[in-house]
Image (spheres, rainbow, N blue to C red):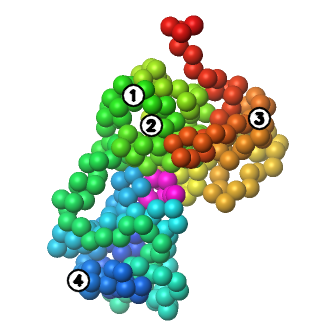
Amino acid sequence: MPEGHTLRRLADDLTATFAGRRVRVASPQGRFAEEAALLDGSLLEAADSAGKHLFLELEGGHVVHVHLGLIGKFTILPGRPVEPVGAVRLRIVAGGDGRDPAYADLRGATQCALVTPEQREAVVAKLGPDPLRADADPERAWRRISTSHRSIGELLLDQAVVAGVGNVYRAEVLFRHRIHPLRPGRTLRRKQFDAIWQDLVELMAEGVVLNRIDTVRPEHTPEAMGRPPRKDDHGGEVYVYRRHEQPCHVCGTRIRTEVLAGRNSFWCPRCQPRYRSRARA
């Protein structure tokens, strides 16, 4: 499933391509046909994201709410549209206005619905703070985490706690702060949470710019370590994600994995030792 940086970049790209233009809206697949007919010819004002949710804002207070889910793709292409390939739920076309023609096709999304601004706000209200948004309030996440018996690895994937963080950022930010994914949220110190939050802000913002996830520090890059670059379909250099049984870049210990909150969690047993409370000790 795409993580928050992917949706933020997509929103920025859609805004750059279509904002301020009257667009043709269609649903070649037919599942969004009635709504598309209502929107056809409207001015597209902007696109925005919150966590893993995307919103297209059109004149008249119309909002298209998109959630890509596991396999969804929203592809922006230059030029005039060609015959749709596959099940295109939503097609947006711009041209004839003195700017370069372009179109965008949405396929495979779990959610594509026309909603009101109030409905959009209701969706956003259910989400935790998004590290990529300027209006994010990390205090909301801290209140949930600091009182929870659930593991920090589970909490970071809960979109109601922190929005936009997925399996890669979860694994990587916990490694970078030497925290075991099974450590109970309520045992974290405030300084640890603040450091994790700030790291997510910076890492995810970099992900928007690079369009991939890179989490290794300069001293652990392939060039610095003299190792081959990582080959993976998600791209980027990482410490533990999808590196089960491979040596840790920091200490050489074999990376471990275990299912946590329905997703594979990855960690280094030496760099991220299991938490043991002083009281139990």
Highlighted range, magenta: 1-10
Tell me if I can see residue 193 in this picture. no
Find the distance from the CA under tag 2 to the CA under tag 1.
Answer: 9 Å
Instruction: Kindly identify the residue that appears in the image at 38 percent across and 58 percent down.
Output: 53
Q: Amino acid at mark 4?
A: Leu
Pointers 2 and 1 in contact (C-beta within 8 Å)? yes
Instruction: Kindly identify the residue that appears in the image at 77 percent across and 40 percent down.
Output: 245
Q: Amino acid at mark 1?
A: Ser
Whichever of labels 2 and 3 marks the residue nearer the N terminus, that label is 2
Q: Which residue is mark 1?
A: 148
Locate residue 29, reporting x and y percent: 42, 85
> Viewer-proximal residue, 96 or 122?
122
Residue 198, quarter of the rendered image: top left
Magenta stretch, main secondary structure class: helix
Say which element carries label 3. Answer: loop
Find the distance from the CA under tag 2 to the CA under tag 3.
Answer: 25 Å
Whichever of labels 2 and 1 marks the residue nearer the N terminus, that label is 1
Q: Which residue is mark 4?
A: 38
Q: Amino acid at mark 3?
A: Arg
Find the distance from the CA under tag 3 to the CA under tag 1.
Answer: 30 Å
Q: Amino acid at mark 2?
A: Leu
Q: Residues within 10 Å of mark 1 (few under 14, many from 20)?
A: some
